[in-house]
């Protein structure tokens, strides 16, 4: 669902997935509005959803290009709590600050804000050189990067809020280590971007990897607890060669 440029305050559908069962036969289909004439939808109720309209990438492009410099990140439901963490952070270049929750959230937020603003500028420039549809396609990698950054931030904020709501102190401490591992892993995966845009020094970038190794060591004694806690099926816990039933054969052979 995208914000509809022509209907302020409402949302509009950009894609659809349909499923049907008839005479014990299943049907399914998926569709995305690339660049259709949206006036055709005026005489129908797409997907039976009356309260929302229909949009397309070109419409979204115009909306994004017109809001560059005015992009505001929408927080999760834990807005006040998350903002308190950010405000309380004491950030510096020391390795330990990477474990500071406020620092982690701020790094995720900075990346998302930068990518949103830069992709909007690129869309705006490209739309002057080519059709809106071609402009959208030409910066698709940038759009996907911005979308990933948004999802990463939302997941982190939800994780932090979940830890805060956990009543068990021991579980809260363990989940805090897992949250560190998630945050640092995301930063490491996009380390090149953080260094290139000077959000991380080269030395601090190395500290990210050390931090991941530190958290992995801390979690190792709790592996079984985590596997049980996250409900990982037994069939996914072992490689065939490491399955307990096969270990005896390996040792005796």
Image (spheres, helix red, strand yellow):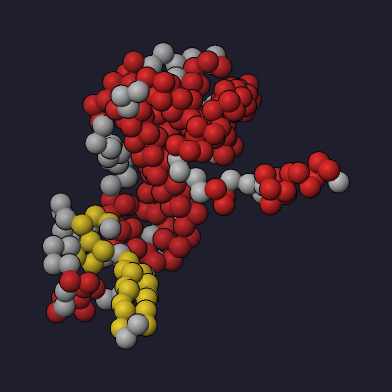
Q: Describe residue 101's horizontal placement relative to residue 235 as left or right.
A: left
Q: Residue at x 41, y 61 (%)?
A: 136
Q: Quadrant of residue 74?
A: top left
The picture quadrant where one finds residue 118 is top left
- Would you say residue 208 is visible in this rendering? no
| Of 231 and 82, the residue lying toward us | 231
Residue 191 visible in the current orientation: yes
Quadrant, the N terminus: bottom left
Give coordinates of residue 173: x percent, y percent.
43, 21
Drawn side of residue 59 relative to residue 99, left or right: left
Relative to residue 93, is residue 69 depicted above or below?
A: below
* Residue 140 coordinates in the image, percent (x, y): 46, 57
User: Residue 79 is drawn in which quadrant?
Assistant: top left
Q: Residue at x 32, y 66 (%)?
A: 15
Is residue 188 depicted above or below 242 in this figure? above
Q: Nearer the viewer, residue 149 or 246?
A: 246
- Residue drawn at x 39%, y 24% is 172
Location of residue 93 in the rendering, given as x and y in whole percent from the top left corner: 53, 16
Q: Is residue 77 left or right of residue 120?
A: left
């Amino acid at each position: 669902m995208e914000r509809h440029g022509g209907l302020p305050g409402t949302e509009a559908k950009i894609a659809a997935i349909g499923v049907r069962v008839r005479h014990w036969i299943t049907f399914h289909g998926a569709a995305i509005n690339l660049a259709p004439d949206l006036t055709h939808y005026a005489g129908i109720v797409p997907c039976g959803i009356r309260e929302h309209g229909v949009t397309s990438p070109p419409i979204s492009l115009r909306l994004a290009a017109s809001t560059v410099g005015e992009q505001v990140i929408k927080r999760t439901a834990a807005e006040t709590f998350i903002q308190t963490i950010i405000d309380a952070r004491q950030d510096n270049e020391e390795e330990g600050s990477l474990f500071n929750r406020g620092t982690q959230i701020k790094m995720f937020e900075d990346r998302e804000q930068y990518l949103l603003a830069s992709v909007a500028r690129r869309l705006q420039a490209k739309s002057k050189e080519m059709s809106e549809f071609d402009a959208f396609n030409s910066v698709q990698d940038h759009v996907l990067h911005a979308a990933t950054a948004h999802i990463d931030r939302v997941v982190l904020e939800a994780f932090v809020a979940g830890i805060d709501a956990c009543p068990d102190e021991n579980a809260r401490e363990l989940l805090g280590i897992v949250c560190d591992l998630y945050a640092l892993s995301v930063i490491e995966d996009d380390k090149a971007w953080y260094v290139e845009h000077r959000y991380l020094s080269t030395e601090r970038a190395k500290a990210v990897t050390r931090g991941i190794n530190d958290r992995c060591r801390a979690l190792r004694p709790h592996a079984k607890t985590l596997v049980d806690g996250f409900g990982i099926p037994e069939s996914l816990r072992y490689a065939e060669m490491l399955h307990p039933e096969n270990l005896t054969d390996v040792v005796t052979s």
